[in-house]
Image (tube, rainbow, N blue to C red):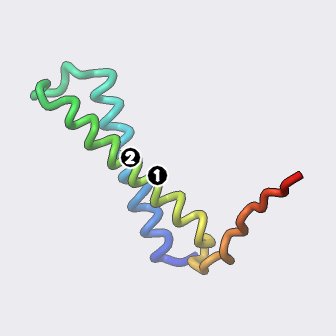
Amino acid sequence: MSKFYTAAMSHWKAQKDEAVATLELYFLKPVGIGEHSEMLAEINKWTQKLAEAEENINALTTYFEDDGYAKEEPKKKRVLNG
């Protein structure tokens, strides 16, 4: 297994886990948050981090094998008329 591939996946999975944990805190235990006036901005920031992590994980798994080798170009689905 490629160490660089593993490191990249670990990075994005950790960012995803951090974003989920933070959002869970904001949604379920907002009394633990000091500055409530910025809460929605923080929720938006962590939602963006979650989406970025998920997108990057999906990109890596779509285009690369676990060993770091690039997969063949994904086949495009053809639509048949008729």
Compared to 3, does 61 lie above or below?
A: above
Residue 35 relative to residue 48: left or right: left
Element assignment for label 2: helix
Question: Mark 1 highlights which residue?
Answer: 54
Residue at image position (52%, 63%) is 59
Residue at image position (48%, 76%) is 3
Compared to 62, does 36 lie above or below?
A: above
**Front one among 3 and 47:** 47
Residue at image position (66%, 75%) is 73
Question: Mark 2 highlights which residue?
Answer: 50
Residue that sits furthest to the front in the current view: 82
| Mark 2 and mark 1 residues within 8 Å of each other at the beta carbon | yes
Disc 2 residue type (three-letter): Leu
Q: Which of the image's four quarters has the N terminus?
A: bottom right
Residue at image position (33%, 46%) is 48
Residue 77 relative to residue 1: left or right: right
Residue 64 marker: none
| Other-residue count near label 2 (Cα within 10 Å), few / some / many at <14 / 14–19 / ≥20 | many
Residue that sits furthest to the bottom in the current view: 69
Disc 1 residue type (three-letter): Glu
Residue 63 relative to residue 22: left or right: right
Q: CA distance from mark 2 to mark 1?
A: 6 Å
Which image quadrant for residue 23? top left
Q: Could you tell me residue 68's position as x and y percent?
A: 56, 77
Q: Could you tell me residue 52's position as x and y percent?
A: 39, 53
Residue that sits furthest to the top in the current view: 31
